[in-house]
């Protein structure tokens, strides 16, 4: 589907806002190098580099972008956030292992029952988002019931959780029904526009988490 000039602008902005988040995170590495937040810095850098590879790597070598994102980049994102929430926010390793196993097993189900070629694996993305939604809601519950609720603006997880809500949870209908929505260009354009805008906002919130979220963990 051909993109409009505005959608192309948002798509380019998405990439460079990811880069901005990685740079801001890297600039804050020194005070966080002995905390688990350093892994979030590594994550942002790796995601930006992976997006660059996805955008321009085809100029130098041939690879399937669909497989690159479906089997590598998207699973990496989900599993990282399962770890960030379950292990580092909730101190629950078992929850991390269970959610990761459920998500990974969805690829086997997808291969058996949804083997047709798709740009995005809707079943895997839907399950991944539903599991992440549970963690997001639990994080909101913990924040609301925390004694530090009045200092939420200094809590990194507040900004991260909000960004994840807007992007991953907000785009769930878009990817869950991606194949169907392609036949309805107007609705597809609206959802795709939201996908780009929410992605930009998410990475801006990630950047803000390093600037304003100074709480020590």
Image (cartoon, rainbow, N blue to C red):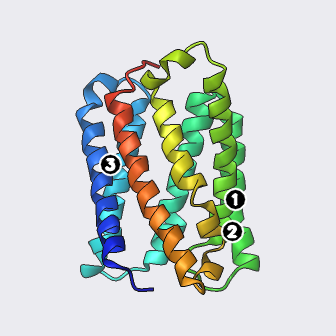
Against 64, residue 18 (above or below) is above
Outermost residue, top direction? 147
Closest to the camera, between mark 3 and mark 1, is 1
Mark 1: secondary structure:
helix
Against 38, residue 8 (above or below) is below
Outermost residue, front direction? 186
Q: Which residue is mark 3?
A: 45
* Front-lying residue, 11 or 68: 11
User: Label 1 neighbourhood size at 10 Å, few (<14), some (14-19), many (20+)?
Assistant: some
**Mark 3 in CB contact with mark 2 (< 8 angstroms):** no
* Disc sitting over residue 123 in the figure: 2
Mark 3: secondary structure:
helix
Q: Give the percent coordinates (x, y) of residue 69.
A: 48, 68
Q: Give the percent coordinates (x, y) of residue 181.
A: 61, 79
Q: Give the percent coordinates (x, y) of residue 202.
A: 43, 48
- How far apart in space, not on screen, are marks 3 and 1 (Cα)? 26 Å
* Disc sitting over residue 127 in the figure: 1
* Disc sitting over residue 68 in the figure: none
User: Label 2 neighbourhood size at 10 Å, few (<14), some (14-19), many (20+)?
Assistant: some
Q: Earlier in the sequence, mark 3 or mark 1?
A: 3
- How far apart in space, not on screen, are marks 2 and 1 (Cα)? 6 Å
Residue at figure coordinates x 54%, y 37% from the top left: 84
Q: Earlier in the sequence, mark 3 or mark 2?
A: 3
Q: What is the quadrant of the N terminus in the image?
A: bottom left
- How far apart in space, not on screen, are marks 3 and 2 (Cα)? 28 Å
Residue at figure coordinates x 55%, y 30% from the top left: 88
**Mark 2 in CB contact with mark 1 (< 8 angstroms):** yes
Residue at figure coordinates x 53%, y 39% from the top left: 161
Inspect this view and state whether residue 119 appears: no
């Amino acid at each position: 589907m051909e993109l409009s000039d505005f959608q192309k602008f948002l798509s380019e902005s998405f990439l460079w806002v990811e880069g901005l988040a990685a740079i801001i995170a890297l600039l804050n590495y020194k005070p966080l190098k002995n905390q688990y937040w350093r892994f979030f810095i590594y994550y942002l850098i790796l995601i930006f580099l992976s997006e660059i590879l996805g955008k321009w790597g085809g100029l130098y070598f041939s690879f399937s972008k669909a497989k690159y994102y479906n089997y590598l980049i998207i699973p990496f994102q989900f599993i990282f956030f399962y770890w960030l929430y379950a292990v580092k926010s909730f101190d629950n390793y078992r929850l991390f292992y269970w959610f990761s196993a459920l998500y990974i097993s969805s690829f086997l189900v997808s291969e058996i029952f949804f083997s047709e070629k798709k740009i995005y694996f809707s079943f895997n993305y839907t399950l991944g988002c539903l599991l992440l939604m549970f963690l997001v809601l639990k994080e909101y519950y913990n924040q609301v019931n925390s004694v530090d609720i009045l200092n939420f603006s200094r809590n990194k997880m507040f900004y991260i959780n909000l960004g994840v809500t807007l992007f991953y949870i907000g785009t769930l209908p878009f990817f869950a029904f991606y194949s169907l929505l392609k036949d309805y260009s107007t609705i597809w354009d609206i959802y795709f526009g939201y996908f780009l805008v929410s992605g930009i906002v998410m990475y801006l919130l990630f950047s803000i988490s390093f600037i304003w979220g100074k709480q020590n963990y």
